[in-house]
Image (cartoon, grey):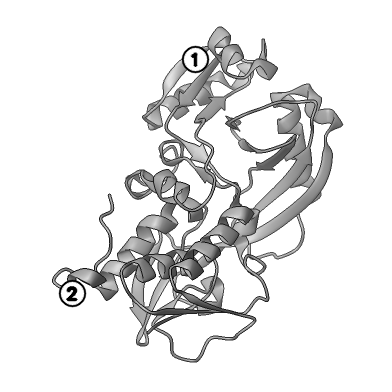
Amino acid sequence: MITIAGGGLAGLSSALELARAGAAVRVFEAAEEIGAGSVSRYAGGMLAPWCEAESAEEAVVTLGARAADWWAEITPVTRRGTLVLAPPRDSAELTRFARRTSGHRTLDQAAITEMEPSLAGRFARGLYFVDEAHLDPRRALRDLARAARDAGVDIELGTKAPAQVDLDCTGFAADLPDLRPVRGEMAILHCPEVEITRTLRLLHPRIPLYLVPRGQGVYMIGATMIESAATRPITLRSLTEMLSAAFTLHPGFAEASVIETGAGLRPAYPDNLPRLERHGGTLHLNGLYRHGFLLAPAMAARVTQHFFPEGSDADHRQRETA
């Protein structure tokens, strides 16, 4: 039996891969329901490794390249790519973004209009990352838990983990050295007047925005990465700037209803890459930063390889991964 503390994204992904490899797995989650105690509920759910390369290490692209395929076996994944845009005054930001990334093609105004008619005449140039995707984080966590249970994982909700477990995926509760909080803020809008079908990124030198469609006129917007441990609700400045950026994308967002706001702390290491390391006899998976849904599948495969290394019984090996 492999025991796991934490039934969030990292814990459930690891549990599923371990169970698929043939292990008996038990997960202890302190929250009463899936996702209630996870910062992942505030995520954008973007499976966008090539865009992330603009500010992340090459490892993010390598580890995240097959994430969409992994998730598509578990939960609905929208594969319509990512469209990166910039207002005319910030066109230099688009050029810089293009230089730092790959896997895109340049669109002119006519191509942007054909792709997203709601944006007709608003942007002269854009970058299209065709192989990127997105999912609904809250549904994905629930579906992940169901897939884990179907694979035989015992998930104990509302239960504190024992003092000693095999794998710890509890984020800040693990109190690991070098781990720091990075605050992220988001808002969910209802705006049926605007029809956007794919993830959009609006570049700005101070506060870039991403907008992720959830369907039926609902959109998630996010932007902030603040070096702060504050757990208070979203600030007025952040909300104002995000809403202003949404208005820049399309003036129809001026009539949007703000149906939810939120803020969460993402655990991150100094290099903003996740780590799998042992402390005090327990293996820890932590530091997923803003790349949780993107990197969790690859990190779960690494967890499985740790428990069932090369040369173990064939029935107890991880499945082939990229």
Q: Of the residues tagged 2 and 1, which is closer to the observer? A: 2
Q: x, y (%) of residue 227? A: 59, 57
Name the residue at 44% across, 90% down: 164
Q: Is residue 146 above or below residue 51?
A: below
Q: Amino acid at mark 2?
A: Asp
Amino acid type for the residue under numbered disc 1: Leu
Q: Is residue 118 left or right of residue 110?
A: right
Residue 89 sits above or below residue 140 on the image: above
Looking at the image, the residue that sits furthest to the bottom is: 163
**Image quadrant in which the N terminus is located:** bottom left
Q: Residue at x 67, y 12 (%)?
A: 120
Disc 1 target residue? 107
Q: Does residue 179 appear anywhere in the picture? A: no
Q: Is residue 187 left or right of residue 87?
A: right
Tell me what residue is drawn at x 27 percent, y 64 percent: 318
Q: Nearer the viewer, residue 74 or 38?
A: 74
Q: Nearer the viewer, residue 279 or 128?
A: 128
Viewer-nearest residue: 126 or 195: 195
Give residue 44's mark: none
- Place of residue 17 in the rendered image (x, y in percent of width and height, measured from the top left): 37, 65
Q: What is the secondary structure assignment of the residue under circle 2?
A: loop
What residue is shown with label 2? 313
